[in-house]
Image: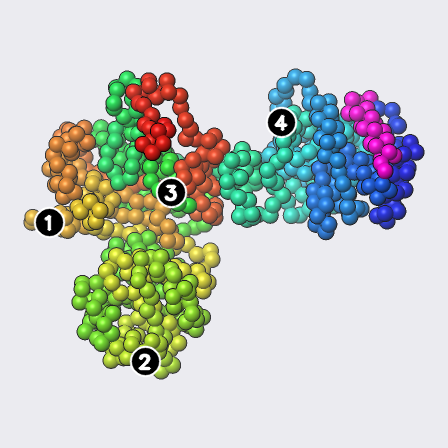
């Protein structure tokens, strides 16, 4: 029609587009050509209607813009996106031809709805694929395959249409060629991102291979295309358009609220498949190599004092009573040993109502293990078998064996942490005996009060300026965040035996400077960072400073794997809030028999306990267990658990011990945390299908949610009213 030729003329004059006339001519010819499909008739009608709208526009400039939008905004073209140069919405396939275009969204949406209605089959279909998208290779040339998946991208080149179809294995390019039926070409041209499709076609070599993708040597020439489902609303983010590692650009709340879309992203698909592959490798070691038996333990059990708050489930049939969700299967697996199960394991769901962080969830998964008739070495060897299998299968890494072992006392002395990262140095030196009685009262006073003084020597200390070590500096702030009152520092002089820095510190320590520097293992030009006070605070603060300095100075080697066992933990630690001892691990851990021999005080004993640490992250731990009632009662007494309360809480376990409990021990791996490290993820939320937020909420399902009064009444519970406003 004349209106379309006018639109093309105006468009060409404004934007300098010599190709517009030829593009319009092709569109007109295509519109006038005989068509058999409903989609073709819809396009022809839409083309004529848009041309009329352009002809009646009042402004020449707006006429041209509207013409470009009308002609190029057909549903067969990709949805408009902002141009990188102009910021104006431009259909993606035409971005090189136009610098600006205004797309009338109502017209596009209306036509998209019409096309969608005509593309979807009347009846639901369940097609069977015979090939996955990401597994096609050059040797598949000539095969006829049926693929099912989601449209990743679509490109209409004005006669030839390309679409990337994606499933859990990857994507492959689908193309319409000279032999492709018109119905299949029309369907390909109408596709949008994340439509669900079934494609049957011939595998052929690409004329221009793409060696950046596994399927880049081939493409599928479509013979039949079936649209199984469409997208009815705007996508909140691109599924695979963002570069790898750009998760930070997506707000986590958006990802979690739209988790079904988030899980389609290639990185999340890899994470979930890695998790499944890791679990499979662990099961194989336990069952095929060590003859373990998988046993499920109850989810609804009773509340026990295990350190964190329990999640409680009110009982309908027992008014006023509650079940508790298990924090771990600890008691059940010990009773399985008494029952003769010998070697038990379980991929167990656990629940703890505690404050969350990046590596914690209210519900989490652990690989739970218990063995009868074994010593600590037997359990540690099994743990190394499992760890090596997980890293080989999940990351193709061969961990060196045997794993290093370090006592708890050594770890706290050198690193201030029971899960040290030993990939780099920066070990702490204890200086109490060196600085005691010196003129620097801050250090001497700390020692006199029963505290400690520690120092870290930082090589080439000039890399850290004094401003970073003083109040408001980043290194200083790390010490404050760890609970310290400040951060003292000095630099080693060029002679290697004198200190430079604050006058009071240098003068007060000058008589012992040479000995102090030697104790720290420092040399000329090194920086010394000091912590002084009670041991717990100093360890916590200096541990934070150590890790921060290592990261900021790039001292953490990439690709290195430091795995070690921490052993000989104390049995108990002091709980300041409750003014009593509590078990450092749990009250079923056996005491070191050397420490309790000949009437030794169990309160001062070491535990036969062990933690597995990888690159500064605790991934597992366990202990040998108490298996006699008399010893268990001593531990309960040490933590202030009276006989009546112990009987009420743990009577069933104590009763079991009287029926011939075997010596046993075990351990557990935090599966979420282990997979997080194998995947290189920043949070365990990235390796859990449907995780909770830091406030223990599910943004996808809006859980936890309100329940009806009738449901509450059935559980013999009433909603309390706030005293301030009377609201429930």
Closer to the observer: label 4 or label 2? 2
**Helix, strand or loop for the magenta stretch, by majority:** helix
| Residue 592 visible in the shown view | no
Residue at horizontal 12 percent and vertical 32 percent from the top: 644
Closer to the observer: label 3 or label 2? 3
Q: Quadrant of the N terminus?
A: top right
The front one of 309 and 333 is 309
Residues at marks 3 and 2, CA–CA distance in whole angstroms: 46 Å
Neighbourhood count class around disc 2 (C-alpha, 10 Å): few under 14, some 14–19, many 20 upward: many
Residues at marks 2 and 1, CA–CA distance in whole angstroms: 46 Å
Residue matched to label 4? 129
Residue 195 position in % (x across, y down): 65, 31
Of the two numbered discs 1 and 3 on the same chain, state the one appearing first in sequence: 3
Q: Which mark is residue 356?
A: 3
The answer to whether 31 appears left or right of 450 in the picture is: right
Neighbourhood count class around disc 4 (C-alpha, 10 Å): few under 14, some 14–19, many 20 upward: some
34 drawn magenta: no
Q: Which residues, given as a range, are shown in magenta? A: 36-58
Residue 284 position in % (x across, y down): 40, 36
Q: Residue furthest right?
A: 2
Residue matched to label 1? 601
Residue at horizontal 14 percent and vertical 43 percent from the top: 638
Q: Which mark is residue 683?
A: none
Residue matched to label 2? 498
Q: Secondary structure at mark 1?
A: loop
Position of 116 relative to 159 (above/below): above
Of the two numbered discs 1 and 4 on the same chain, state the one appearing first in sequence: 4
Tags 4 and 3 in contact by the CB under 8 Å rule?
Answer: no
Q: Quadrant of residue 454?
A: bottom left
Closer to the observer: label 4 or label 3? 3
The answer to whether 652 appears left or right of 6 in the picture is: left
């Amino acid at each position: 029609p004349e209106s379309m030729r006018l639109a093309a003329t105006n468009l060409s004059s404004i934007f300098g587009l010599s190709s517009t006339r030829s593009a319009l001519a092709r569109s007109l010819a295509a519109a006038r050509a005989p068509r058999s499909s409903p989609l073709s008739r819809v396009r022809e009608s839409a083309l004529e209607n848009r041309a009329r709208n352009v002809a009646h526009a009042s402004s020449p400039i707006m006429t041209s813009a509207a013409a470009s939008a009308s002609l190029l905004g057909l549903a067969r073209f990709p949805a408009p996106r902002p141009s990188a140069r102009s910021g104006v919405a431009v259909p993606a396939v035409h971005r090189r031809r136009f610098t600006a275009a205004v797309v009338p969204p109502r017209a596009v949406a209306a036509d998209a709805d019409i096309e969608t209605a005509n593309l979807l089959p009347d009846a639901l279909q369940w097609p069977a694929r015979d090939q996955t998208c990401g597994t096609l290779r050059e040797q598949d040339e000539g095969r006829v395959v049926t693929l099912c998946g989601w449209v990743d991208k679509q490109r209409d080149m004005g006669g030839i249409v390309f679409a990337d179809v994606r499933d859990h294995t990857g994507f492959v390019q689908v193309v319409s060629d000279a032999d492709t039926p018109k119905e299949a070409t029309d369907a390909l041209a109408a596709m949008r991102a994340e439509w669900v499709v079934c494609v049957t076609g011939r595998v052929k070599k690409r004329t221009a291979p793409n060696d950046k993708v596994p399927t880049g040597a081939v493409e599928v020439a479509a013979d039949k295309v079936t649209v199984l489902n469409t997208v009815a609303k705007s996508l909140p983010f691109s599924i695979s358009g963002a570069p790898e590692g750009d998760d930070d650009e997506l707000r986590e709340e958006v990802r979690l609220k739209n988790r079904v879309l988030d899980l389609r992203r290639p990185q999340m698909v890899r994470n979930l498949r890695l998790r499944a592959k890791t679990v499979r490798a662990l099961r194989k070691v336990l069952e095929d190599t060590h003859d373990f038996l998988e046993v499920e333990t109850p989810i609804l059990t009773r509340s026990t004092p295990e350190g964190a708050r329990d999640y409680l489930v009110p009982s309908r049939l027992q008014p006023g009573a509650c079940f508790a969700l298990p924090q771990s299967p600890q008691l059940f697996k010990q009773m399985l040993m008494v029952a003769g199960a010998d070697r038990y394991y379980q991929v167990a769901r656990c629940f703890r109502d505690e404050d969350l962080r990046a590596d914690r969830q209210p519900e989490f998964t652990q690989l739970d293990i218990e063995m009868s008739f074994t010593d600590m070495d037997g359990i540690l060897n099994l743990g190394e078998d499992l760890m090596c299998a997980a890293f080989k299968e999940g990351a193709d890494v061969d961990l060196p064996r045997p794993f290093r072992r370090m006592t708890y006392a050594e770890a706290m002395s050198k690193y201030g942490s029971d899960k040290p990262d030993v990939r780099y140095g920066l070990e702490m030196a204890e200086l109490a005996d060196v600085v005691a009685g010196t003129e620097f009262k801050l250090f001497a006073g700390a020692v006199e009060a029963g505290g400690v003084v520690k120092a870290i020597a930082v090589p080439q200390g000039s890399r850290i300026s004094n401003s970073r070590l003083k109040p408001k500096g980043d290194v200083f702030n790390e010490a404050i965040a760890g609970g310290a009152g400040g951060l003292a520092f000095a630099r080693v002089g060029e002679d290697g035996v004198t200190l430079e820095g604050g006058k009071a510190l240098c003068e007060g320590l000058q008589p012992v400077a040479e000995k102090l520097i030697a104790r720290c293992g420092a040399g000329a030009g090194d920086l010394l960072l000091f912590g002084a006070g009670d041991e717990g605070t100093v360890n916590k603060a200096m541990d934070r400073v150590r890790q921060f300095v290592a990261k900021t100075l790039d001292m953490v080697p990439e690709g290195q794997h430091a795995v070690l066992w921490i052993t000989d933990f104390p049995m108990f630690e002091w709980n300041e809030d409750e003014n009593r001892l509590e078990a450092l691990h749990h009250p079923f851990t056996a005491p070191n028999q050397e420490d309790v021999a000949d009437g030794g005080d169990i309160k001062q004993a070491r535990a036969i306990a062990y933690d597995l640490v990888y690159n500064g992250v605790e991934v597992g731990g366990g202990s040998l267990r108490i298996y006699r009632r008399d010893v268990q009662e001593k531990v309960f007494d040490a933590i202030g658990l009276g006989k009546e309360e112990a009987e009420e809480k743990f009577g069933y376990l104590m009763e079991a011990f009287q029926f011939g409990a075997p010596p046993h021990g075990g351990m557990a791996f935090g599966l979420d945390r282990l997979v997080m490290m194998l995947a290189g993820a920043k949070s365990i939320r990235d390796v859990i299908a449907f995780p909770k937020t830091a406030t223990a909420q599910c943004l996808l399902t809006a859980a936890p949610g309100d329940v009806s009064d009738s449901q509450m009444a059935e559980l013999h519970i009433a909603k309390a009213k706030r005293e301030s406003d009377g609201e429930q």
